[in-house]
Amino acid sequence: MRPETLVGDHTIYACVMGSRAFGLATEGSDTDRRGVFLAPTPLFWRFEKPPTHVEGPAEEQFSWELERFCELALRANPNILECLHSPLVEYADATGRELLSLRGAFLSRKVHETFTRYAHGQRRKLEADVRAHGAPRWKHAMHLLRLLSSARDLLRTGTLTIDVGEERESLLAVKRGEVSWPEFEARMTRLAQEAEQATHHSPLPAEPDRRRVEDFLVRTRRASALQAGPYDEVVQGVVRGGGVGQD
């Protein structure tokens, strides 16, 4: 089965991400689409397993297979957690809606480590730009502040909100390069300190609810295996054809 078929026929959840989901879109902003697909269980019985992710088929589109998506979410991957909380959901079937109902099960105080580690990496890149060119890439600087603010608020409240709301104009000013590098550094440092302080009193649990997520994944895989349809024919066709790489 071709990767684009998995996305086209087996997507369970699709949303818009990037600036449009963050409330930071301006004229000419791209539309970044993200999704989750459920590879039919019989495809895992082949030597050649389904892909863990698929880029495309449309421009600015990227999708993860459900199991990989859940693994990354349990590790508090910032991009994955934000995808689950997009305010711009384009599609969700019954399985996708159950995935969305599990959003809280993925959240834990681990977000402090993962969000800030990602932020530190981005900060080093911005500092390298300043050394090389005298200024950072301000768009990346804007998104770094947005991420740190989101992490701080998540740790404070236990709720992940990715639309920047009233912070839109101040963040867009950063994108336009209307702040100085020292001012940006001060804001970044303050947000990191506030996130650190929030960790000690956060309502989030220490660990995500891995058992609840795993139960969902097992039930979903079992239902796919028991579903009557063309998937058995796919596997039988592979066996009859004498190869595992055939579509």
Image: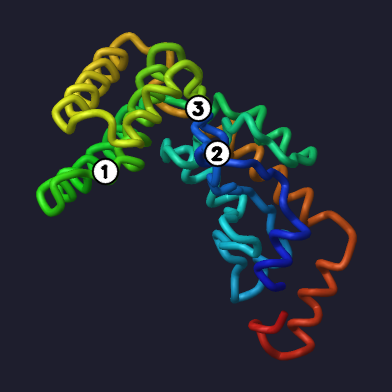
Is residue 114 depicted above or below 8 in this figure? above
Residue 138 rendering spot, x and y as whole percentages: 30, 40
On the image, the x and y values in percent for residue 103 come to 58, 29
Q: Quadrant of the N terminus?
A: bottom right
Q: For marks 3 and 2, give the CA distance.
A: 9 Å
For the residues carrying marks 3 and 2, which lies nearer the camera in this image?
A: 3
Alpha carbons under labels 2 and 1: distance apart: 19 Å
Please, what secondary structure does the residue beneath circle 3 have?
loop
Compare marks 2 and 1 and give the one earlier in the sequence.
2
Relative depth, front residue between 123 and 245 = 123
Q: Which mark is residue 122?
A: 1
The image shows residue 63 at horizontal and vertical percentages of 59, 54
Kind of residue sitting beneath label 2: Cys
- Whichever of callouts 1 and 3 sits on the residue coming sooner in the sequence is 1
Mark 3 vs 2, N-terminal side: 2
**As displayed, is residue 66 above or below residue 241?**
above
> Left or right: where does residue 229 sit relative to residue 93?
right
Work out which quarter of the rendered image holds the C terminus and state it.
bottom right
Q: Which residue is mark 2?
A: 83
Circle 3: residue type: Ile
Farthest left residue in view: 131
Which residue is drawn at the image coordinates 29% and 19% (left, top)? 195
Tag 1–tag 3 contact (CB < 8 Å): no
Q: Which residue is mark 3?
A: 162
Q: Is residue 145 left or right of residue 59?
A: left
User: What residue sits 22% from the left and 38% below the top?
Assistant: 120
Does residue 217 sit above or below 60 in this rendering?
A: above
